[in-house]
Image: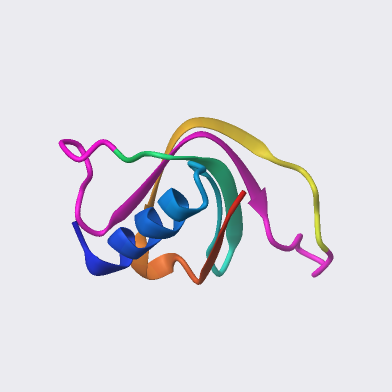
Amino acid sequence: MSEKFEKILKIADVAHSSRIELWTPTFKAVGVLYKSDDKVVDGLVTLTNVKVYPLFSENGESTCLSVDRDWLNIFEDKVIAFTVI
């Protein structure tokens, strides 16, 4: 498990929540942080029951359209911000 992912897990544990919002340069994802030690893959942050929101539409305006996913893997180096919900 990478140092970055360990920090995210520790913050989620302190907040007593597994719901998290992750931001990447192109989208944000809101879901449940997957914490199973035996299935965590180095370099990935995995979310379940996820809603994915694009940050901007083609004309540069925010959009609230979302896509639902059961499972989403995000490369850790693409995470630019996060908050525990």
Viewer-nearest residue: 21 or 9: 9
| Total count of labels | 0
Q: Is residue 74 left or right of residue 85?
A: left
| Residue 73 in picture, x, y percent from top left | 37, 46
Task: Using residue 25 as the reference point, say whether residue 33 is left or right of it.
Answer: left
Task: Name the residue located 44 percent from the left edge and 59 percent from the top edge.
Answer: 11
Tell me: 41 left or right of 24. Answer: left
When the figure is inspected, residue 18 is found, relative to residue 6, above or below; the finding is above
Give whichever of 50, 67 is nearer the camera. Answer: 50
List x then y, in percent, for residue 5: 31, 60
Residues drawn in magenta: 36-61
The colour mode here is rainbow
21 shown above or below 17: below
Residue at 15% x, 36% y: name it. 38
User: Farthest residue toward the left?
Assistant: 38
Q: Quadrant of residue 22?
A: bottom right
Seen in the image, is 40 located left or right of residue 27? left
- Residue at (42, 67) in percent of width and height: 78
Residue 1 position, x and y percent, is: 18, 56
Q: Is residue 54 magenta?
A: yes
Q: Nearer the viewer, residue 79 or 11?
A: 11
Q: Residue at x 59, y 45 (%)?
A: 30
Give 55 or 32, whichever is nearer the viewer: 32
Does the magenta-highlighted stretch encompass residue 58? yes
